[in-house]
Image (cartoon, rainbow, N blue to C red):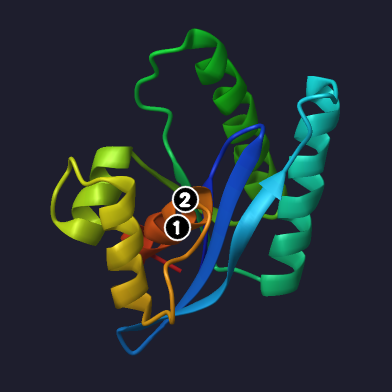
């Protein structure tokens, strides 16, 4: 099974692709999609759409997992993250892929066993679980891998 994890954001959208084969998780690819704050929002969202479409076409995931917008302190940030999430949801639908969503708490518990884990703790556990040579950078990419790891423990009907 191949899983594409997405940590949505308009400035930086993290992505992580993993495979699960006979219970073994392996990192295939990870990184970020970045957009310039100098661009109009519709252009930034289009970049996210195009890049995720390209990732889907290249990696051919079975599942897309995305982080839910659970709680935000800054409403402006929440709106822009919600717009990026919408692009991810639409892209998954257009590709006819199974999409599952997780709260940050669910992801932290699945990866570290602790719902209040720090970014550093998540990076360290992702590194151990996927047997990476170093901590995945930046945080958004590590978070996307963590989302994919969380999805790997789910059972899906095919």
For this orientation, the residue located farthest to the left is 114
Question: Which residue is pictured at 59% across the width and 57% down the height?
Answer: 97
Rendering coords of residue 99 (x, y %): 50, 50
Q: Is residue 107 visible?
A: yes
Identify the secondary structure beneath mark 1: helix
Q: Can you say whether 58 is above or below 76 in the image?
A: below
Q: Can you say whether 21 is above or below 14 in the image?
A: below
For this orientation, the residue located farthest to the bottom is 22
Residue 25 — which label? none
Dot 2 crowding, Cα within 10 Å, few <14, some 14–19, many 20+: some
- Give residue 82's quadrant in the image: top right
For this orientation, the residue located farthest to the top is 75
Identify the secondary structure beneath mark 2: helix
Which residue is labeled 1 in the image? Answer: 142
Rendering coords of residue 117 (x, y %): 21, 46
Q: Can you say whether 75 is above or below 133 in the image?
A: above
What's the CA distance linking mark 2 and mark 1? 5 Å
Q: Can you say whether 110 is above or below 29 in the image?
A: above
Rendering coords of residue 135 (x, y %): 42, 67
Which residue is labeled 2 in the image? Answer: 139
Labelled pair 2, 1 in contact (Cβ < 8 Å): yes
Dot 1 crowding, Cα within 10 Å, few <14, some 14–19, many 20+: many
Rendering coords of residue 28 (x, y %): 56, 78
- Give residue 56's quadrant in the image: bottom right
Q: Is residue 154 visible?
A: no
Q: From the viewer's perspective, tell me whether residue 14 is left or right of residue 11.
A: left
Question: Which residue is pictured at 83% across the width and 24% down the height?
Answer: 38
Question: Which residue is pictured at 39% across the width and 18% down the height?
Answer: 72
């Amino acid at each position: 099974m191949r899983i594409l994890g997405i940590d949505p954001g308009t400035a930086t959208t993290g992505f992580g692709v993993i495979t699960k084969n006979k219970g073994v998780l392996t990192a295939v690819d990870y990184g970020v999609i970045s957009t310039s704050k100098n661009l109009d929002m519709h252009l930034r969202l289009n970049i996210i759409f195009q890049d995720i479409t390209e990732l889907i076409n290249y990696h051919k995931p079975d599942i897309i997992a995305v982080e839910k917008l659970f709680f935000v302190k800054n409403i402006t940030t929440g709106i822009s993250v919600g717009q990026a999430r919408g692009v991810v949801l639409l892209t998954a639908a257009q590709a006819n892929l199974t999409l599952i969503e997780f709260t940050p708490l669910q992801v932290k518990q699945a990866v570290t066993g602790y719902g209040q884990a720090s970014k550093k703790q998540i990076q360290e556990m992702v590194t151990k679980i996927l047997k990476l040579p170093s901590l995945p950078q930046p945080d958004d990419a590590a978070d996307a891998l963590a989302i994919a790891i969380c999805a790997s423990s789910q059972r899906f009907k095919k």
